[in-house]
Image (spheres, rainbow, N blue to C red):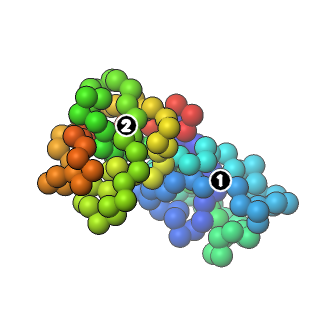
Amino acid sequence: MATVTLIGTRLASEGTEFVYQGESSACEGCPYRDQCLNLTAGRRYEVVAVRENANTLECAVHDTGVKAVEVEPVPVRANVADASAFAGSKASLEGPCPHTDCPSHEYCEPLGLDFDDEYRVEEILGEPPHEYCMLDRDLTLVEFAPPDDA
């Protein structure tokens, strides 16, 4: 189900994905804060609709202002241990990886997920994009369902 929120005009287009970072110190005293600060910090969202005829409102965080949009939490692709890769099961990330040039790095450290949490595997996607893991991990690429608190 979509949530109406305000985001920067540069992000306000259908299909844009972002990780909500939470409240900024510049939000203090803003009359629109209840409409902006209604998402879960650290979660990944996608803009599914831009509200028609929405005014651009001034914002101390976004230099070009904010607009009303509808967003939904999105599934996140990630690498998990082969032993945890079953659709419908819970799995967690294997841990940080210092190899930022690896083609799988974005899946080993996906934005919007925490290493300490478990997530429900929605779909098995198969082999990760790397040829071999430099940390000698046996990994499978999966898609996690959006967290329930998103």
Question: Circle 1 — which element?
Answer: loop
Toward the top, the furthest residue is 88
Toward the bottom, the furthest residue is 63
Question: Circle 2 — which element?
Answer: strand
Q: Residue at x 30, y 29 (%)?
A: 84
Residue matched to label 1: 22
Q: Are marks 1 and 2 in contact (CB under 8 Å)?
A: no
Where 42 falls versus 16 (above or below)? Answer: above
Q: CA distance from mark 1 to mark 2?
A: 22 Å
Q: Residue at x 33, y 31 (%)?
A: 122
User: Label 2 is placed on what type of residue?
Assistant: Phe
Residue matched to label 2: 144
The C terminus is located in which quarter?
top right
User: Label 1 is placed on what type of residue?
Assistant: Gly
Disc 2 packing (10 Å; few <14; some 14–19; many ≥20): many
**Percent x, y for residue 3?**
58, 43
Q: Mark 1 vs mark 2: which is more N-terminal?
A: 1
Disc 1 packing (10 Å; few <14; some 14–19; many ≥20): some
**Percent x, y for residue 82?**
23, 33
Asked whether 105 or 134 is in front, the reply is: 134
Q: Residue at x 76, y 56 (%)?
A: 32
Regarding residue 4, the answer to whether it shows in the image is: no
**Percent x, y for residue 29?**
85, 60
